[in-house]
Image (cartoon, rainbow, N blue to C red):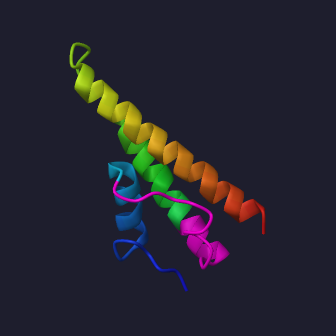
Amino acid sequence: MANWMGGSSPAMANQVAGGFCSVTAATLRGFLPAELNTFKLELEKQLRNARAEVPPQDDALAQQARNHKIGRLTAALQVVNNQMYSR
């Protein structure tokens, strides 16, 4: 049984995107394969939304925030994929 930070898979993916929680192998230890797949889908959805946001070219802080969000989501996806395929 998964222990979702934030209560659900979409909420946890949103927290990862915001930088409020990080995803590690220890965090995902109690997750079942179906739960990992659900979380992976939510992370991919958040990543698509982050890439769809196009800040103005002259707003460096907005560009930086977007890039940080994409980086956090990509790193979390790598951890989830590794956890899924190492079992």
Report the number of discs. Answer: 0
Which corner quadrant holds the N terminus? Answer: bottom right
In this rendering, does residue 55 appear at all?
A: no
In the image, farthest residue toward the top: 58
Residue at position x 70%, y 56% from top? 82
Q: Is residue 62 left or right of residue 85?
A: left
Q: Quadrant of residue 6?
A: bottom left
Q: Quadrant of residue 37?
A: bottom right
Image coordinates of residue 34 in percent, x first then y, are 62, 74
Q: Is residue 85 left or right of residue 46?
A: right
Q: Quadrant of residue 14?
A: bottom left
Vertical side of 27 occupied by 43: above or below:
above
In the image, farthest residue toward the front: 26
Residue at position x 53%, y 52% from top? 76
Q: Is residue 39 magenta?
A: no
Vertical side of 76 occupied by 26: above or below:
below
Q: Is residue 33 magenta?
A: yes
Which corner quadrant holds the C terminus? Answer: bottom right
Vertical side of 23 occupied by 38: above or below:
below
In this rendering, does residue 48 appear at all?
A: yes
Image coordinates of residue 83 in percent, x first then y, are 68, 62
Residue at position x 22%, y 13% from top? 58
**Magenta region, mostly helix, strand or loop?**
loop
Q: Is residue 41 left or right of residue 19?
A: right
Residue interval drawn in magenta: 20-38
Residue at position x 47%, y 80% from top? 3
Image coordinates of residue 70 in percent, x first then y, are 44, 38
Image coordinates of residue 86 in percent, x first then y, are 78, 63
